Image (cartoon, helix red, strand yellow):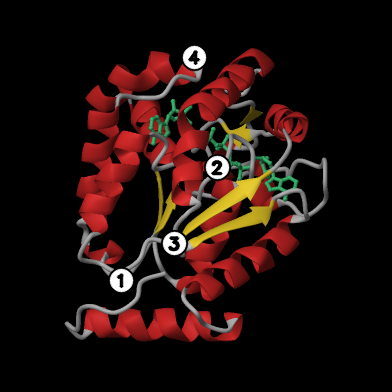
Amino acid sequence: MLGPPGAGKGTQAERFAREHGIPKISTGDILREAVQSGTELGRKVKTEMERGELIGDDLIIGIVRERLSQPDAIAGFVLDGFPRTAAQADALDAITAARGPVICVEIRVPDEELIRRVRGRRVCEDCGANADAFVHQVDALPELCQNTDRCRSIGPKWVARSDDSETVVRERLKIYWRDTKPMIDYYSARPTFRRIDGLQTPEQVREALVSAVASALGLPAAQLRSLVAKKLSGVKGGVKGGARP
Ligand code: AP5
């Protein structure tokens, strides 16, 4: 999933992964969890993340390489927030060379809408989950984060993400246009590249994403889920190879 901050990558990656039974791998989530738990990785990246800067390629590539080697990612995965630079894109090609096509979907949204969305985003102070995941009305925060027993017991603590202030978002957008957009343009020449309009409702974007992935695999959208299920059962049964969504 490719696109600028606030495009809806995380929202859509989460749904697609859940509906197709494959893991969502978000480098932003991995880093935020590390910061939240105060691990060595978290201490290393905290300041850069708060400023909206990118973390070094070697560190991020190492994290993704290790995560993609885990058994639950063998049949397929959704990557959210990676790759973001040419070096990361090259590394992803090398890591996945023997594993079937990588499908790249860019979600496009105008900058002013991105800033509006990100400034309005609230996350659970305890676990980092997005408030929108627990509510269906626009502009209404749910009373409680439902993500963990702990969240349910301690009550609502919705806060802005530490890198969501307007100044930092503008810095993140500047970095996106400078470092990530050229990499996306490079991907756009590939037959497995698709671009979708992220200005639609989340449900319309979800449908566009499923159609985009299916068409990149040369399938009708309705067959996508059964292909993934077949692939997953093949992996569980020890069969390898084939197309990977
Ligand atoms: P990361 O967490 O990846 O942040 P990001 O790319 O800036 O993306 P966001 O999480 O802000 O937005 P999103 O596109 O996921 O949108 P979302 O679905 O949440 O990275 C954070 C930091 O980690 C980076 O700045 C960097 O420091 C570091 N990092 C991470 N990966 C790295 C890498 N590979 N290399 C180096 N450094 C890395 O939606 C946003 C809001 O809009 C939500 O409130 C949502 O509910 C709402 N929304 C979603 N869809 C719609 C819609 N269709 N209509 C209306 N509202 C919508």
Whichever of callouts 2 and 3 sits on the residue coming sooner in the sequence is 3
Label 2 sits on residue: 129
State which mark lies toward you, 2 or 3.
3
Q: Is disc 3's CB within 8 Å of ligand 1?
A: no
At x 60% / y 63%, what residue is drawn? Answer: 209
Mark 3: few/some/many CA within 10 Å (<14, 14-19, 20+): many
Going by the numbered disc 3, the residue's amino acid type is: Ile
134 left or right of 34? right
Between disc 4 and disc 3, whose residue precedes? 4
Q: Nearer the viewer, mark 4 or mark 3?
A: 3
Looking at the image, which is closer to me, 38 or 234? 234
Label of residue 75 in the image: 1
- Residue 162 visible in the picture: no
Residue placed under numbered mark 3 in the picture: 103
State whether residue 137 is above or below residue 203: above
Q: Secondary structure at mark 3?
A: loop
Using a 10 Å C-alpha cutoff, classify the residue at mark 1 as few (fewer than 14 neighbours), some (14 to 19) or many (20 or more): many
**Identity of the residue drawn at 25% across and 44% down:** 91
Q: Residues within 10 Å of mark 2 (few under 14, many from 20)?
A: some
Mark 3 to mark 1: distance in Å?
A: 14 Å
Q: Is residue 205 visible?
A: yes
Can you tell me whether the CB of the residue at mark 4 lies under 8 Å from the nearest atom of ligand 1? yes
Q: Earlier in the sequence, mark 1 or mark 4?
A: 4
> Residue 51: which disc?
4
Q: Is residue 23 left or right of residue 150?
A: left
Alpha carbon separation for disc pair 1 and 4 = 36 Å
Q: Secondary structure at mark 4?
A: helix
**Disc 4 residue type (three-letter):** Arg
Q: Nearer the viewer, residue 99 or 32?
A: 99
Q: Is residue 12 above or below residue 170?
A: below
**Depicted 138 relative to depicted 51: above or below:** below
Q: Kindly state the secondary structure of the residue where label 2 is placed.
A: loop
